[in-house]
Amino acid sequence: MSRPYAEVIGDPIAQSKSPAIHGFWLDKLGIEADYRATRVTQDEVGAYLIKRQADPDWRGCNVTMPLKQAVQAHLHSVEEPAASIGAVNTIYRSPDGRLLGTNTDAAGFLEPLTQELQGAHLFRMARILGAGGAARAIAHALAERNFTLVIAARRTEQASALAAQLARSEQHHVVSLDHFAGATDFAFDDRQGMLDLVVNASPLGMRGKPALQFDWSHAPPGAIAYDIVTDPLETPFLQGARDAGHETVDGLAMLIGQAAEAFRRFYGASPPRQHDGELRAMLTS
């Protein structure tokens, strides 16, 4: 007997933690359904979606690199905020069978910052390291919440194109990623009433990738360090932040948050977030 299922697609895909997260929630809720990981290359996206749309058991998929832009041409519509971000990370089926694309990365990124964002601030600034698909979602989310952004990338033209698409584009800045590699003696002003973030939105520091070179003298006092890398969870970026006295948010926070948004669309139920501690322990064991 067949069972409903959703999946995550990308290339490579073996390292994805999404099957473990969704499987954990399905078990806790007693939902008779599956969640899988399927390797799909950019050349295979069109055929993959045609096949899945014809499968009545398929409920949708999460989309990871390098497919977040490639899938868009094969969908019936792309919803906000994915349309503005220019990247789709979740595909689901409408009641009439159409394939819809959305982006849950922005909501997942913001979730662990909910308490801070509820406060009133004289000024909000975020240094975003990276300008790829995840960085696009993060930059759009923060710009909509009145952050002034400094976007740092190895390809500054990519960062400039991103900055130009954001709300209040004239207030954002672009620098080379190398700008933050060496120490600075810049004297930060009084940060009372400010909200500062430093976000690694790049794959640097991921297992098998070069380390991210960031000198913490570039971070204002009281800044929150946020690394979206999940493998390893404890990155040199976060360790350096803690050594410099900063609060940190690790990559599982965003991963679980964005998965929760997708889970609701796939299975029509809210994930049991009261078990987040147990879920994190499972994912890091």
Image: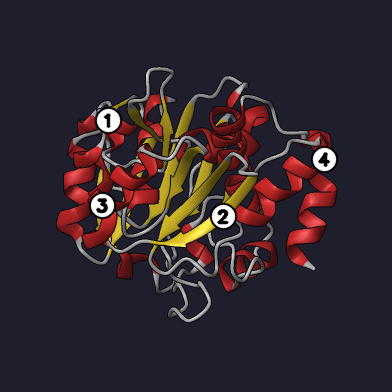
| Pick the front one: 34 or 13 | 34
Amino acid carrying mark 4 in the image = Lys
Residue count near mark 2 (Cα–Cα under 10 Å), binned few <14, some 14–19, many ≥20: some
Q: Which of marks 1 and 3 is nearer the N terminus?
A: 3
Image quadrant in which the N terminus is located: top right
Residue count near mark 1 (Cα–Cα under 10 Å), binned few <14, some 14–19, many ≥20: some
* Callout in the foreground (1, 2): 2
Image quadrant in which the C terminus is located: bottom right
Q: Which residue is label 4 attached to?
A: 28
Q: Which residue is label 3 attached to?
A: 47
Position of 55 compared to 262: left or right?
Answer: left
Residue lying furthest front: 1
Residue count near mark 3 (Cα–Cα under 10 Å), binned few <14, some 14–19, many ≥20: few
Q: Is residue 259 visible?
A: yes
Q: Quadrant of residue 75?
A: top left
| Pick the front one: 190 or 253 | 253
Q: Which of marks 2 and 3 is nearer the N terminus?
A: 2
Residue at mark 1 to residue at mark 2: CA–CA distance: 26 Å
Amino acid carrying mark 3 in the image = Ala
Q: Which residue is label 1 attached to?
A: 83
Q: Earlier in the sequence, mark 4 or mark 1?
A: 4
Amino acid carrying mark 2 in the image = Arg
Q: Earlier in the sequence, mark 4 or mark 2?
A: 4
Q: Helix or strand or loop: what does disc 3 sit on?
A: helix
| Pick the front one: 100 or 233 | 100
* Callout in the foreground (4, 2): 2
Q: Count the marks: how many?
A: 4
- Percent from the top left, x then y, of residue 155? 20, 63
Q: Which residue is label 2 attached to?
A: 36
Q: Quadrant of residue 263?
A: top right
User: Which residue corresponds to the image point at 43% horizontal and 33% vertical from the top-left?
Assistant: 92
